[in-house]
Image: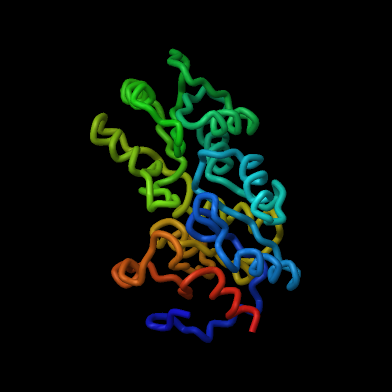
């Protein structure tokens, strides 16, 4: 366990709701990390609940359930809350029942429709909002269409501010990087919905009836995962298996409650 900065005697015995990031935290692209299954079994044994909260909007909840089940992880729809779900809730609350232009993967567009959002992927004079997700199917035609649509005076939403997405060989650009590129071209900056906003954390605590003291956020990024925990007022654990390093943690004023090398080391500490 990393001991340079944090109180390693922090009491975790009352933690029952564990909100886990996915990419870089429990797996890397399609490779599950050693210790993930042990940690999830530990949560089950103490009568707790684990929910995967992810900024990655390229897949639907059903896609994620299928993916983790194939990795051997026991999970159903109740074990997930995504930035797509949070974005749909934001649209309903702040924009109402309006037509929204959606740019993202086919799964992203389908999920928004299933969540009750009126969606189009073509120009329409009745468009009252624009939403962009992490798009693993991105091409120049989509960027051109977004650049044109961003000239409209309508709210512009992005599911998450992540700059990179971890993959097997390193990283690829995520939604935040694409948003910066579009801002350079159009001058428009989006309203970000996912982490570091506390929206997903607050929703899940309320849904399952857990308090802030019983809740812990676990992730690999200080500027999203850890920041969301701080914004929600709950315990946060940073794992060094993804984007963050000891150097980035040292340099960032937003400090996690605890830091571990990876989820295996976290499990070993909790199961003592």
Residue at image coords 31%, 70%:
247
Measuring from the top left, give residue 65's x and y in whole percent. 66, 46
Q: Is residue 20 left or right of residue 62?
A: left
Residue at image coords 53%, 64%:
218
Specify the quadrant of the image occupied by residue 35: bottom right
Residue at image coords 33%, 68%:
253
Q: Is residue 262 left or right of residue 85?
A: left
- Near-viewer residue (144 or 256): 144
Find the residue positioned furthest to the top: 125
Q: Is residue 153 visible?
A: no
Measuring from the top left, give residue 75's x and y in whole percent. 70, 53
Numbered disc total: 0
Give the image's coloring scheme. rainbow
- Near-viewer residue (69 or 45): 69
Q: Is residue 154 above or below residue 9?
A: above
Find the residue positioned furthest to the bottom: 9
Q: Which quadrant of the rendered structure holds the C terminus? A: bottom right
Q: Is residue 53 visible?
A: yes
Measuring from the top left, give residue 215's x and y in whole percent. 61, 67
Q: Is residue 87 above or below residue 271?
A: above
Residue at image coords 37%, 38%:
190
Q: Is residue 32 above or below residue 128?
A: below
- Near-viewer residue (28 or 85): 28
Specify the quadrant of the image occupied by residue 148: top left
Measuring from the top left, give residue 185's x and y in whole percent. 24, 30
Q: Is residue 171 above or below residue 95?
A: below
């Amino acid at each position: 366990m990393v001991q340079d900065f944090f109180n390693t005697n922090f009491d975790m015995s009352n933690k029952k709701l564990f909100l886990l990031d996915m990419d870089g935290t429990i797996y890397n692209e399609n490779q599950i990390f050693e210790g993930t299954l042990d940690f999830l079994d530990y949560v089950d044994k103490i009568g707790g609940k684990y929910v995967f909260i992810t900024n990655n909007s390229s897949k639907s909840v059903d896609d994620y359930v299928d993916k983790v089940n194939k990795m051997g992880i026991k999970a159903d729809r109740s074990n997930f809350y995504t930035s797509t779900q949070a974005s749909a809730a934001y649209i309903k609350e702040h924009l109402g029942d309006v037509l929204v232009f959606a740019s993202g993967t086919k799964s992203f567009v389908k999920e928004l429709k299933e969540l009750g959002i009126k969606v189009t992927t073509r120009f329409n004079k009745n468009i009252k909002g624009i939403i962009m997700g992490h798009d693993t199917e991105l091409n120049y035609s989509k960027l051109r269409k977004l650049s044109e649509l961003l000239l409209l005076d309508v709210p512009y939403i992005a599911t998450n501010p992540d700059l990179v997405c971890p993959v097997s060989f390193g990283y690829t650009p995520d939604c935040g990087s694409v948003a910066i590129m579009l801002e350079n071209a159009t001058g428009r900056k989006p309203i970000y919905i996912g982490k570091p906003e506390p929206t997903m954390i607050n929703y899940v605590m309320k849904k399952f009836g857990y308090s802030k003291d019983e809740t812990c956020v676990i992730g690999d990024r200080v500027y999203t995962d850890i920041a969301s925990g701080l914004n929600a007022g709950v315990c946060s654990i940073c794992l060094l298996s993804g984007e963050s390093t000891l150097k980035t943690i040292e340099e960032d004023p937003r400090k996690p409650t605890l830091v571990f090398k990876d989820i295996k080391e976290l499990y070993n500490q909790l199961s003592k």
